[in-house]
Image: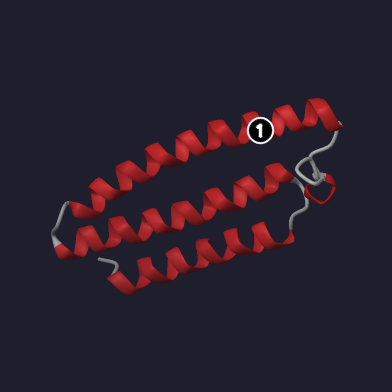
Amino acid sequence: MIGLPAYLVLGAFVFSIGLFGVLTRRNAVGILLGIELMLNAVNINFVAFARFNGDLTGLVFTLFTIAITVAEVAVGLAIVIAIFRVRRTVEADRLDLLRG
């Protein structure tokens, strides 16, 4: 049986990959994927703590987080598509629609 520290290390590793993706990508879709990886790392930790503590609270939080993630993906991709239609690019450096 794998212990709790192994799951926490896995969660930290996945979170680090997601953070690296958010900080280094210029493409808006790549940034969204990095955010998704970070949210999945949080879900791994929730499930690991729920499993090893024998409590269902972590699983309930994970279900809510997954539901929020689905909504975030839908809204984020809709925004990216709308920006692409106007600007013909999804490069984050060129997205200055809110500047005056």
From the viewer's perspective, is residue 29 above or below residue 3?
Answer: above
Q: Position of residue 17 (x, y in %)?
A: 59, 62
State the residue at coordinates (80%, 44%). 95
Q: Quadrant of the N terminus?
A: bottom left
Residue 23 or residue 40, whichever sits in front: 23
Other-residue count near label 1 (Cα within 10 Å), few / some / many at <14 / 14–19 / ≥20:
few
Extreme residue toward the bottom, this view: 5
Q: Position of residue 2 (x, y in %)?
A: 29, 67
Residue 3 or residue 22, whichever sits in front: 22
Horizontal side of residue 57 vs 8, given as left or right: left
Q: What count of labels does the image hold?
A: 1
Instruction: Report which residue position mark 1 lands on.
Output: 79
From the viewer's perspective, is residue 61 above or below residue 42?
Answer: above
Horizontal side of residue 22 vs 48, given as left or right: right
Horizontal side of residue 26 vs 16, given as left or right: right
Q: Position of residue 44 (x, y in %)?
A: 37, 57
Q: Position of residue 16 (x, y in %)?
A: 56, 66
Q: Quadrant of the C terminus?
A: top right
From the viewer's perspective, is residue 19 above or below residue 5?
Answer: above
Identify the amino acid type marked 1.
Answer: Ile
Residue 48 or residue 80, whichever sits in front: 80
State the residue at coordinates (24%, 46%). 60
